[in-house]
Amino acid sequence: MLSYIKITYPYKTISRFLCLFLLTINAFLFLNNTASAQNSKEAGKHSKFSDSLKLRLEIGISAGLSLSKFTKGQPQTGSNTGYTAGISVNYKLEKGVSFQLEVNALQQGGRMIRFKDDTRYGLPESFETKNVKNSSYTLNSIEVPLLINYTFKIKPLWKPSLYIGGSYTYTYNVNEKYQKTGNLLPGEDIIATVSNSQNATNLFNTSRLNLIVGANLKLPLTSRFSLLVDMRYLNGLTTAREKYSYMDKIGFGTNIRTNSFLTKLGIVMPLSALK
């Protein structure tokens, strides 16, 4: 029997992240508009600064797939696939170095196996008190990465980059899809498997930190736009779920994290193209 899942989206939190991102862009744009010169000499200086800043700023959008898996503190059964999509702003410094701020929607997670046996507590054997449960968890999150990029010059039109940084992840919903197998009629050896899904947000931590390493390549599409090919690895630095026990035994368990490999395609353009 299917059950309906009520998902509560954190509109306030998401709006705060978007506001932070937009305020960052507006701060850069505000610097561009400081060319209100008091005289012709000052106007010339501010105009040069504004043009230089526009050449240093680059904005983009991207989307792709994520492949995630929980750490091996407990027996696991496999990986999860999901999606990622977001927006970015890149500020170029000197000699190929730049800073990049992003706001992304990200799905992470993994698979877990659990062996439940409540007959050890004196409960009668039934499908609910003794079973094996294979679960696939999808962690729906808002991620805010801050990266340091270094861009190489292999060819005039080819711009490969390496980057490292970190990200803050806010998980607003966790969906669990599971298969539960057990003896439907104890003593009769009638084995049954039930599939279902449920909300499991309360089992996982809301906030997490990640370490990010990756590389990308920008290829020219038009005079304004470039194609972005991006690959990165997210290593979970903080716990996703605390004291998880595959034996479902109180007092025994491991803090587990989630790691992900992401591939993305996107479009980027310099701010100077917005004229």
Image (spheres, grey):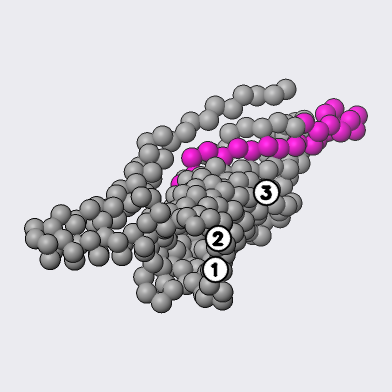
Label 1 neighbour load within 10 Å: few <14, some 14-19, many 20+: few
Residues shaded magenta: 169-194
Which residue carries the number 3 mark?
A: 80
Q: Which structural element holds mark 2?
A: strand
Amino acid on which disc 2 is placed? Pro
Q: Nearer the viewer, residue 221 or 8?
A: 221
Q: Which mark is residue 220?
A: 2
Residue type at mark 1 is: Leu
* Quadrant the N terminus occupies: top right
Q: Secondary structure at mark 1?
A: loop
Closest to the observer, 41 or 27: 41
Q: Nearer the viewer, mark 3 or mark 2?
A: 2
Give residue 176's position: percent from left, percent from top.
Answer: 64, 38
Q: Residue at x 36, y 64 (%)?
A: 56
Residue 139 placed where, x, y %? Answer: 57, 44
Q: Position of residue 49 (x, y in %)?
A: 25, 64
Query: Mark 1 or 2 closer to N-term?
Result: 1
Q: Is residue 187 magenta?
A: yes
